[in-house]
Image (cartoon, grey):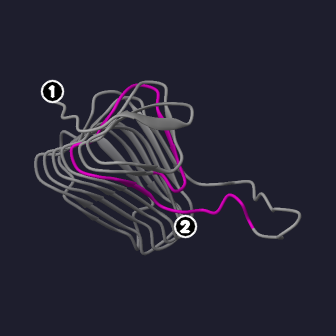
Amino acid sequence: MLTIKNQDRNSVRGLADHHVGELAFSGTDNEVLIGGQVTLNQVNIQFLGNHGRLEIEERCVIRGDIIIHAGATVRIGASTKMNKRCDIRVAANNQVNIGADCLLANVKFHAFESVVLINTVTKKRVNPVSPIVVGDRVWIAENCQLGCGAVIGPGAVIGANSMVMDSIAANSLAVGYPATAIKAGIRWTE
């Protein structure tokens, strides 16, 4: 069963009896939209502020932690599966968008920078908070990390223990720390 804490002045639609975990609000005017045939298994979903949004489309399997700060959004496309616990943390007014038909294993999505780095010459921030975008049919293997600004094209594969900090082309295989594409024109099947 999914335990809900402090739901007053927050909107939750689509929960089912078979969902397991906790959904907690420490703010108001947050919105949770869950599609049909979604499995929430040992989830810990927290809204830390007002006006956050979580959208999980139909037939997804979700495991792990989702932490959403004020004004932030997490979108998970239809039929995406987390076969191991994942960790999604999104800063205020930022986004994490995961496409449809993705396969994820113990992936950390950190669209969150708690420390600001400033270039001493230009006086500009060098680690801006920016969205994470994952295209449709992406496979992200075990123990990967995605940071602010990560953009993974449709059909791409990210090898185990990789870290994505910028763009990975569609239908490519990327590995490493930081991840770089080592093969193009690939297709994966489950």
Mark 1 Cα shell of 10 Å, populated few (<14), some (14-19), many (≥20): few
Q: Is residue 145 above or below residue 34?
A: above
**Image spot of residue 48 (x, y percent):** 55, 60
**Is residue 146 covered in magenta?**
yes
Q: Quadrant of residue 140?
A: top left
**Image spot of residue 109 (x, y percent):** 47, 45
In front here: 114 or 33? 114
Q: Secondary structure at mark 2?
A: loop
**Image spot of residue 30 (x, y percent):** 41, 69
Task: Estimate the spatial distance between the alpha carbons at disc 1 and disc 2, rounded to whole Å.
Answer: 38 Å
Amino acid type at mark 2:
Gly
Mark 2 Cα shell of 10 Å, populated few (<14), some (14-19), many (≥20): some
- Which residue is the site of mark 1? 190
Q: Main secondary structure of the magenta part?
A: loop
Q: Is residue 124 left or right of residue 28?
A: right
Q: Is residue 88 above or below residue 104?
A: below
Q: Could you tell me which residue is drawn at 17 percent across and 45 percent down? A: 38
- Which residue is the site of mark 2? 49
Q: Earlier in the sequence, mark 1 or mark 2?
A: 2
Q: Secondary structure at mark 1?
A: loop
Check residue 83 in the rendering and tell me which mark sits there, or answer none. Answer: none
Q: Could you tell me which residue is drawn at 40 percent across and 74 percent down? A: 9
Q: Is residue 123 left or right of residue 80?
A: right
Q: Is residue 54 above or below residue 98?
A: below
Q: Could you tell me which residue is drawn at 13 percent across and 45 percent down? A: 59
In front here: 81 or 43? 81
Amino acid type at mark 1:
Glu
In front here: 179 or 136? 179
